Amino acid sequence: MIQVQNLTHRYGDRTALDHFLAYGYVPRHLCMLAGYAKLPAGHLLRFELEEIADGEEVSLPALIELAEDRGRPASHYLAAVALATERGVAPAAATTIRVCAGTCQRWGALDLLDHLVARHAAASQPPFAIAPVSCLDRCDHAPACEIHGAHGQLVVAPATTAALDEALRELAT
């Protein structure tokens, strides 16, 4: 323990070290080295998204095309929209699916986003809009989604691709 105290006294951020020892990672912007900060999540993808942004929105078809051109999953760009920009995803629709793209990534949120992108692309008339958000405050039931529309708000948590498909099927009837 003396070595850890010496390390934090000379170079470290005690709060960041406490978080690392308690949780196994250093959350948010904290860094274990004093005077340094982490880059925000998705910071490099943010610059690529700015290339295709139209004002405050990023078109989902353009985002999908960018992801294919760069050889990355569309979910990575959707998560970057939520975490690294203040933009939204267009086009709008009567039904909007909000997907937590923050901590829920650990429990499969990116798979849900890829599934929704595939459903969206396969439909001749897009039945819903995808709205990635940084957090839905439902971490105890991760991954979390909310479906907003004329029906009100439907929470799907913990969300799976099958649960989302079932919810969308029920709402369509």
Image: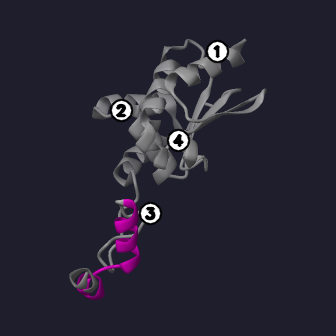
Which comes before the other along the chain, label 2 or label 1? 2
Q: For mark 3, what is the residue?
A: 28
Which is more toward the observer, 128 or 11? 11
Please, is residue 84 above or below residue 12 in the view?
A: above
Label 1 CA crowd tier, 10 Å (few <14, some 14–19, many 20+): few
Q: CA distance from mark 4 to mark 2?
A: 21 Å
Which comes before the other along the chain, label 2 or label 3? 3
Q: Quadrant of residue 96?
A: top right
Q: Nearer the viewer, mark 2 or mark 1?
A: 1
SS label for mark 2? loop
Please, is residue 85 above or below residue 164 in the view?
A: below
SS label for mark 1? helix
Identity of the residue drawn at 46% across and 39% down:
78
Please, is residue 163 above or below residue 145 in the view?
A: above
**In the rendered structure, which segment of residues is drawn in magenta?**
6-23
Q: Is residue 148 visible?
A: yes
Q: Say what amino acid the circle numbered 4 marks.
A: Ala
Q: For mark 1, what is the residue?
A: 169
Which is more toward the observer, 108 or 49? 108
Number of numbered discs visible in the structure rendering: 4
Q: CA distance from mark 4 to mark 1?
A: 22 Å
Q: Quadrant of residue 123?
A: top right
Q: Position of residue 113 (x, y in %)?
A: 48, 32
Q: Quarter of the image for the N terminus: give it.
A: bottom left
Q: Say what amino acid the circle numbered 2 marks.
A: Pro
Label at residue 73: 2
Q: Say what amino acid the circle numbered 1 marks.
A: Arg
Q: Nearer the viewer, mark 2 or mark 3?
A: 3
